[in-house]
Image (cartoon, coloured by chain):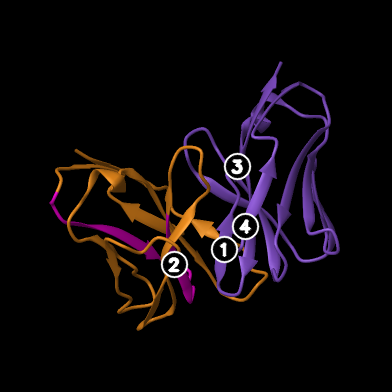
Amino acid sequence: NAGVTQTPKFQVLKTGQSMTLQCAQDMNHEYMSWYRQDPGMGLRLIHYSVGAGITDQGEVPNGYNVSRSTTEDFPLRLLSAAPSQTSVYFCASTTGGSYNEQFFGPGTRLTVL
Amino acid sequence: KNEVEQSPQNLTAQEGEFITINCSYSVGISALHWLQQHPGGGIVSLFMLSSGKKKHGRLIATINIQEKHSSLHITASHPRDSAVYICAAKYGNKLVFGAGTILRVKS
């Protein structure tokens, strides 16, 4: 199993550009989520999904869209990038429930100029 | 608001020392996770617990539901334990993360 994969690893955007961060998992996990990590702060939930076709907002959803058309893929779209979106983005998956291990992707480091 | 507080923010230890990292949270959690983030950035899950204590090698995690508090202990610390340790509380479908504890173990 590849686990959770994310692409790209690094990205530089100009303000106003749009892009999609890709996330895929091959463990047949129902639950997937996107987080951003900023210096001095904990990981913050952007959006999450409890299964194909179901998504919901997390703590910091503004400026981001998600969709979940398959169990495996959970892309995160930046609609119009802003410097405040400069961050490291992590995708994670789990089988769901309260007691299951979280599997994280390697992260995408995004800089918005 | 569901919050998770970790202490200390930074910790430097000598090799061999016993290390404790603390995590406090609000009521209503269904589980508490401890995670490790390596210097290269990757995040791995260490423990999930809802009561009592778990042990894996030199790592021990405990949780006290009444006091809303969890601790991560590292026995016989080693420079390879240097990393950021993160606790995360599960509220419903969502994880709320602490800011992390930066641990440096010197040889």
Of badges 2 and 1, nearer the viewer stands 2
Q: Chain of mark 2?
A: A
Q: Colour of chain A?
A: orange
Q: Which residues are magenta?
A: A16-35
Q: Amino acid at mark 4?
A: Glu
User: 10 Å neighbourhood of mark 3: few (<14), some, or many (≥20)?
Assistant: many
For residue B30, side relative to residue A109 (left or right):
right
Please name the residue shown 77% across and 29% down the image.
B77
Q: Amino acid at mark 1?
A: Leu
Q: Colour of chain B?
A: purple
Mark 3, residue position = B100
Q: Residue furthest top?
A: B107
Task: Same chain for labels 2 and 1? Say yes or no.
Answer: no
Answer with the quarter of the image where residue B105 lies.
top right
Residue B25 shown in magenta: no
For residue A98, side relative to residue A32 (left or right):
right
User: 10 Å neighbourhood of mark 1: few (<14), some, or many (≥20)?
Assistant: many
Task: Same chain for labels 3 and 2? Say yes or no.
Answer: no
Answer with the quarter of the image where residue B47 lies.
bottom right
- Disc number for residue B3: 4
Q: CA distance from mark 4 to mark 2?
A: 14 Å
Q: Amino acid at mark 3?
A: Gly
